[in-house]
Image (cartoon, coloured by chain):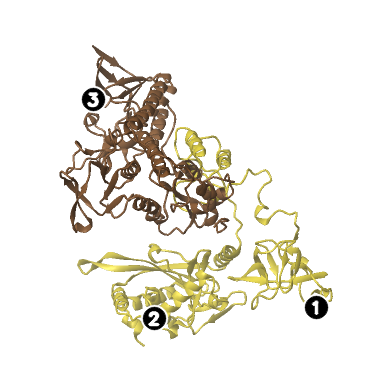
Amino acid sequence: MTETLRPKVLVVGGGPGGYVAAIRAGQLGLDTVLVESGRLGGTCLTRGCIPSKALIHAAGLYEEAVQAAGEAGRFGIHLKQVPELRFDETVGWKDGIIDRLSGGVGGLLRKAKVRTVNGWATFSDAKTCTIDTAGGVITIQAEHVILATGSAAVELPLLPFGGRVISSAEALSLAEVPATLAVVGGGYIGLELGIAFAKLGSKVTVVEAQDRILPLHDAALTAPVSRWLEMHGVTVHLGARALGQDEEGLLIETAGGQSRLTIPAERILVTVGRKPLTEGWGLDQTAVAMDGSFVRIDDRCATSTTNVWAIGDLVGEPMLAHKASAQGEMVAEIIAGHRRRFDPVAIAAVCFTEPEIVSVGLTPDQAPKGIETVVGQFPFQANGRALSMQAGEDGGFVRVLARKSDHRILGMQAVGRHVSEFAGEFATLMEMGAVLEDVAGTIHVHPTLGEAIHESALKALGTAIHI
Amino acid sequence: MGLYLFRLPDVGEGVAEAEIVAWLVKVGDIVEEDQNLAEVMTDKATVEISSPVAGTVTAIHGEVGGMLAVGAVLVEFEREGGSDAAGAPAATAPVKLPPVEAVAKPAHAVHPSASAPANAATPATAPRPLASPARADGGAPLAAPSTRRRALDLGVSLIQVPGTGPAGRITPEDLDVFLERDGKPKTGGASRVARTGVNDTRIIGLRRKIAEKMQEAKRRIPHINYVEECDLTELEALRLDLNEHRTADQPKLTLLPFIMRAMAKALPDFPQVNALYDDDNGVLHAHEGVHIGIATQTPNGLIVPVVRHVEALDVWDCAREVARLAKAVRDGTAAREELSGSTITLTSMGTLGGIVSTPVINHPEVAILNPNKLVSRPVIDGSFITVRKMMNLSSAFDHRIVDGYDAALFVQRVKRLLEHPALIFMD
């Protein structure tokens, strides 16, 4: 049976870019079809952001329990027995969350009257694709096409995925916690998972080719994470190269090619980046222009082909779910006849490492030459709420960068436990074009970690109270 | 307590009146001794007038742009402390001073209730003023997402909208004001907008001085213009060589010092050209010394500092002096003597020099030279065409004193000196 659909809008990919685009299009009354080969929610929801956060949360609780079972206990809490980790149950709990959220997305799509087709779309021209579904072949000819195919983990030729070499997706669904885990790539994905497994009891080794971890962030910001790794027995090899594997584990060449060694590894987690998913669905048939490995777009996410749009990881850095969603929402509105443009002042990025990192806008060493700036930094050590929730002793701080002449905030960063929740305030300040005085003049609730944001602005103005 | 009348002091040799350029105090201000009260302009120098006493300003006389005679009351103070000296300064003021009423331009006392001078010309019904854009960089306009979206929906490019918020942020109200000013919101997304505003600027200070000087020169002097082309190939070769081999203490040479030297060399044979014509009294003062005014563009306008006794300087001296004076006038540190006393003027715009120009004579001088842009041009040499470095030399003369014939002779002499630069250095 062959069915042909002729919707106004076809969305390819059900991740945070595609499903948001489809819901918004549906809300705006556009006849919309969404095609997804896997589960709704995409990488973010099924094998990325959400499951990793669940695992990180469980790992943190387990670590606390293990500590409470030790001689010294925790805040007077002593467990008589060493806690038992049933990792299959942990993974089951995590999968329950995915089911709930993925189901929720399906419900929202239905509510917005979006038809969802489960299968792999193959394009024959820019506006036409066929999908082999369980119920037969469906051909879709759409007026507008939104490409939101996302990205996939980059594979190392010397360490192809398979067997014990796994990507982040597999790492989130392991049957048991590996006794030894080698992480190749010290970016945020590798460190988030590496730290979680270290808390769950793995002996973790991180191998990074550059001379420091989290190379996208500055050294001051990543120092507390380095310190945590060091204090918790996670070995980090910087400037090192992965050469391959043997029976024992991962073969590496240490910094400067000085020596070769084998890192015992039950599992080798390769997290060296992600690449846009541009193959296997007929991108060449759509004839859209490319920009390197990404699809080229303008500030409306329009590709070189009229009425073909592209969003999310497919169109370039930063490969972040919230960017994809914002672009998806915008494209749906443009198709519905609104005038929109993708012009964020800044897109915040968060690392759920231990401690967490959040960064928006420019860092002090990124400040353009010739512009005089001021920096205000406030340590969580001087914040009461931080001390009362064990967030004050890890070297964390809030930092604000502003232009000296008019105090306009150019960037904000923080490192510390729970600081990921600062991302919203930081981004709002940037988008509103705030100056230091705006932050200084806003009463921040006591006792909260957010007081450190207030104090960092005061510090930049030279009037900090608690430091 | 007592009244103290502060009169405009003598601000320079032979200056009878001065223009108020800016008030630095207002009625009600408490001033300290030596605090600056106002800026006044004489000839071309701006002078700050400081207070001889401490006290409270009770009245100020004259508005910005107005002329005030030396000796006229500038500021009235209520003095703190004893009243002994209070009346004295006013009483002992020189009796020859004209009374306040005799001041040339209206110099009514400005009372606190009066609007600020800058707003005086603005009709009461004027729409809310547009602030000038205060963005610190050339980056994207600073505005909240809601404002950006509204502007996009309305087809307004925020680059055109001045922001009044901190750091130049465009507030929702700024967008309202812009729309109000600019008529209806644009449709169709075109960023081209008809501009209908007229900005009124009072011509004061240096600009007014220039305006008056130019008006006076053109009104009094029947100009004749003469243009000749000069082959500077040899001079350029010499200049480049001198620059290449100059010592550390020698300045880089432009063409100006050579032209100055050529003028100094030629002028003794044309005494009526290096002269000041007092047309009111019918006397021509022909100077033996060559004092060349160098027209210099500054951020505020044209100023003509003077290089004195060019006949006694070499090209390096000339270059040093031109550079020093140019810096002084741009910094505003040039002394009165450095801005007056020229006997002939040289004006050059370097690479902006154009092909031909008709300079305005610096009254009461009688001649001005204006070299145009130096360019490589094909020139017929016998039956060949060669490339030569050519420069037109434009000039203007006061026909009352200098006839066309003499003007031509003078320019031809300068041309000969420039084309055969060895002559400049021969005594």
Task: Find the distance from the CA under tag 2 to the CA under tag 3.
Answer: 79 Å
Q: Which residue is mark 2?
A: B316
In the rendering, at what x and y percent does residue B367 appear? 48, 73
Q: Marks 2/1: CA distance?
A: 53 Å
* Local SS, label 1: helix
Mark 2 Cα within 10 Å, few/some/many (few <14, many 20+)? Answer: some
Q: Quadrant of the C terminus of chain A?
A: bottom right
Left or right: residue B401 versus residue A250 is: right
Q: In the shown orientation, is residue B414 left or right of residue A178? A: right
In the orientation shown, which residue stands out farthest toward the bottom?
Answer: B427
**Protein chain holding label 3:** A
**Residue A381's spot in the image, x, y percent?**
49, 53
In the image, A283 versus B247, the foreground residue is A283
Circles 1 and 3: CB atoms closer than 8 Å: no
Residue B132 in view (yes/no): no
As helix, strand or loop, the secondary structure at mark 2 comes to: helix
User: Which of the pair B230/A98 is nearer the observer?
Assistant: A98
Looking at the rendering, in which quadrant would you find the N terminus of chain A? Answer: top left
Above or below: residue A244 compared with residue B360: above
Q: Identify the secondary structure beneath mark 3.
A: strand
Q: Tag 2, which chain?
A: B
What's the residue type where badge 1 is placed?
Thr
